[in-house]
Image (cartoon, rainbow, N blue to C red):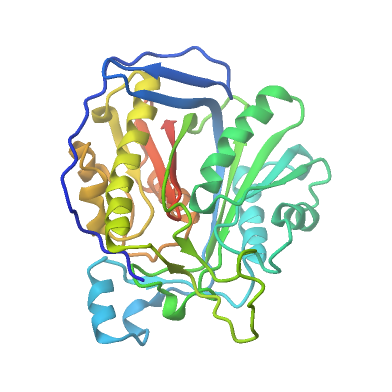
Amino acid sequence: MALIFCCRRILRWRAWGESLVTGMPPGTWSQIMTTNNDIVRASRCSARIGGIGIHLPGEPIPLAEIDLPHALRRHLERTGQEITYSTGGSSTELAISAARDTLDKAGIHAANIGLVISAPTLLTGFGLEIPAVAIRAELGLANADCLNIAQGCVGALAAIRIAAQFLHCEPDRGAVLIVTACKASSLMRNFTHGSFSWGDAAAGILITAASGEGPTVEFYAEQSATADWGAMRIPVGDASMAPLVPDISLQINVDFPSHEAQIDYIMGEKERCGGLINSLTSVAGIDASDIKAVFLPSFGRKRVPLLLEQHPELIDRVASDFRCAHLGGVDVLYFLDSYIHNSPPLSGSWSIALSPAFTAQWGGVLIRH
């Protein structure tokens, strides 16, 4: 079912009170009570980005060449998306390619990786494997431990917090390699679930405590849903295995109990996105106007004004390329990497990378360049 991005009501914007700068060690939480009794929380990371690797399989596929019903095509054209990517390989194979590219770009030896974190956006190639283990084996990361995070498009961002905690607790173990992959083409018909188009890709990011050039992730924060957190689904969860039949569809769908629940979710997304930005800026002691770039997933340019309704000054600072199909958790890393290399930010400037994870939550990081 396509998400209908419309409003039933206009929610009142709640101004945030005074913010403060915390002096916490990496991995600890800041909790601030504002003058309006709003609570903002964020986890200090203070970890440097040592490199980003992006793997886009094959040549871009024009979305205009994909066979779609006329009404659906007209709807999708309004998203601004123009191209997608597809691979015959698995998401784990995508992840291995991105991991290799990340290490090459960072110029780091395999022996200096202490932890590999995989964060697949959707299903893995075999459904049960741990992609981090495959990456460790293929790249010869003999000194690395492995961790897998199944947190959708937020996974890679949430992994940065874990990486910061690892670097703080075990500073002699080495850097952390985080890899996210999205193999969407096998889970939906014609690259879409009705709301926007998807594609296949992978990205890696190296997180290190070492000093040097490169952006620093200062804080991580998230805002989670309290209702309909499982509306986006595929029909093979453990609650649906009993009636499994050979021809069961594996396509992603979004299933709200009612039209009202769907609208409540859409408005809730606005609150979670705005609240996330408030959390990150408040704990850093800055205003939203201090943010020079915002990296949102490529889920359609028409969603931006609603999502940033609390912070309209940021609408023109969105640095996402909405011409590309949604690549899951790869999106914000892809756009961040492009921003760093194509529009080098001023030293000391701030940016935010944030993403929703299915219908469950929003997560994001505050970056100091």
Q: Is residue 90 above or below residue 72?
A: above
Residue 114: which quarter of the image?
A: top right
Identify which residue, 127 or 318, lies in the foreground: 127
Which residue is most to the right? 142
Residue 18 placement (x, y as % from top left): 28, 14
Quadrant location, the N terminus: bottom left
Residue for point 66% across, 55% down? 100
Residue 231 placement (x, y as % from top left): 44, 60
Residue for point 27% across, 15% down? 35
Q: Is 115 displayed left or right of 351 in the figure?
A: right
Q: Is residue 2 above or below residue 369?
A: below
Residue 346: which quarter of the image?
A: top left
Residue for point 55% across, 31% down? 48
Quadrant location, the C terminus: top left
Residue for point 22% across, 49% down? 306
Identify which residue, 150 or 66, lies in the foreground: 150
Q: Is 342 displayed left or right of 9 in the figure?
A: right
Identify which residue, 319 or 79, lies in the foreground: 79
